[in-house]
Amino acid sequence: MHRAARSWPGILLLVLLACTSSPPTREVPPAQAAAVPAAQVPASSGAAPAAEAAPALRKIDFVTSTLSASGTPLWLGVDQGIFRGYGLDVTVQALSPAAATPAIQGGSAPFGATAGVTIAAFAGGATELVFIGGVSNKILAQLYAQPEVRSVGDLRGRAVGSTSPGATLSLTLIEALRRYGLDPNQDVSILYLREQPGVLAGLIGGQAGGGLLAMPFSRQARNQGYRLLFDTADLDIDMLGQAITTTRDLLEREPDLARRFLMGYVDAIQFGRQHRAPTVEAIMRLGDSDDREIAEEAYTTYRASWSPWVLASAIQPVLDNSDVPAARALRAEQLIDDSILRELQRSGWLAEHLTSP
């Protein structure tokens, strides 16, 4: 059985985007792994079909710097035995963003889900780090406003709440306001309230005319009668949440390991898209919550966003708005190596294993 070691204060962090520090670690018993047929690696990898001789399981750690419903497929890959079908015994370990990237650099974890800290490390000279797949390329949140604010234009001259300067939630808010014809530097005042609970409190307390809120705080704002002005899911704003991270050295030394991991991850995304009930149950169990309504809403919100691809268009705004000068000089493509996914795409394997959401 797998043990998924994670830091978790409950369902809030499962559906909350990356904007808080990591709480104390605890372990959560995984679900009974489903029986998964032995997987067959594409012939280009040189590996024999697993059905002929099941490979010995290789134990690996996967580190993640943010616990979010966007990363649900990673947990499904463990719980449903999907990674095992590719010969991998994966343990997901939740670390702080400051610890996750060094764990990958140092080799204690071959893969991880990271974002901003990895970008800063790359800009600082750690160019061995590379994104090989995607976790989340969009920040899904809703702008709720005071009842008297009837349109985005009515926010002119008011304060709008967000988390912190440079956070992807704040960058998404800035881009969204621009799309509605507002200059975020002149027409509104962005009130940085550090964390999502603070943004909601600013709205309730009247400090802000509106606030950009992710689940479950957006749900609380809705239930308290605040007005929905827009949903970022409707605006198609690319913004990096997390990406599958490794090192160029590992890709060179063990391309088959990276290939098998990504294949398992793709199958886990497909499982999540096709099997609502066990995926919702995984959200509830991993969040240590019996609130099915929240888990169901999280599933509906994030299901279509699960994708194995990391997008340059999602990384570039993070680089352009970084407070690290060297990062602003980078192009997103310098941080991406999606050659394995493209190989799987050319072979036809990807189309067979991943359908449209």
Image: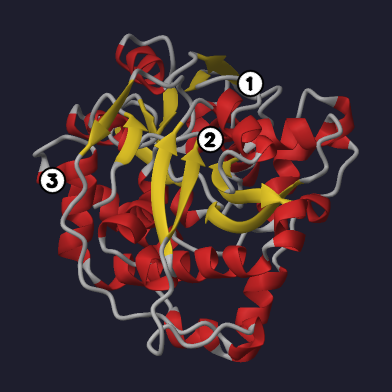
Kind of element beneath mark 2? helix
Amino acid type of the residue tagged 3 in the rendering: Glu
Whole-percent x and y of residue 1?
Answer: 24, 52
Whole-percent x and y of residue 196?
Answer: 40, 23
Crowding around mark 2 (Cα neighbors within 10 Å: few <14, some 14 to 19, many 20+) is: some
Q: Is residue 53 above or below residue 280?
A: below
Kind of element beneath mark 3? helix
Crowding around mark 1 (Cα neighbors within 10 Å: few <14, some 14 to 19, many 20+) is: some
Residue 241 visible somewhere in the drawing = no
- Residue mark closest to the camera, 2 vs 1: 1
Amino acid type of the residue tagged 1 in the rendering: Pro
**In this figure, which residue is indicated by the disc labeled 1?**
165
Tell which of 225 and 89 is nearer to you: 89
Kind of element beneath mark 1? loop
Relative horizontal placement of residue 339, taking residue 38 as reference (left or right): right
Disc marking residue 48 = none
Crowding around mark 3 (Cα neighbors within 10 Å: few <14, some 14 to 19, many 20+) is: few
The answer to the question of whether label 3 and label 1 lie on touching residues, with beta carbons closer than 8 A, is no
User: In 3D space, how far apart are the residues under numbered discs 3 and 1 (Cα atoms)?
Assistant: 32 Å
**Quick one: label 3 or label 1, which is nearer the N terminus?**
1
Amino acid type of the residue tagged 2 in the rendering: Gly
User: In 3D space, how far apart are the residues under numbered discs 2 and 3 (Cα atoms)?
Assistant: 33 Å
**In this figure, which residue is indicated by the disc labeled 2?**
153
Disc marking residue 293 = 3
- Residue mark closest to the camera, 2 vs 3: 3
Whole-percent x and y of residue 168?
Answer: 59, 35
Q: Is residue 22 above or below residue 127?
A: above
Residue shown at 53% from the left, 69% from the top: 260
Whole-percent x and y of residue 307?
Answer: 50, 64
Q: Quadrant of the C terminus?
A: bottom left
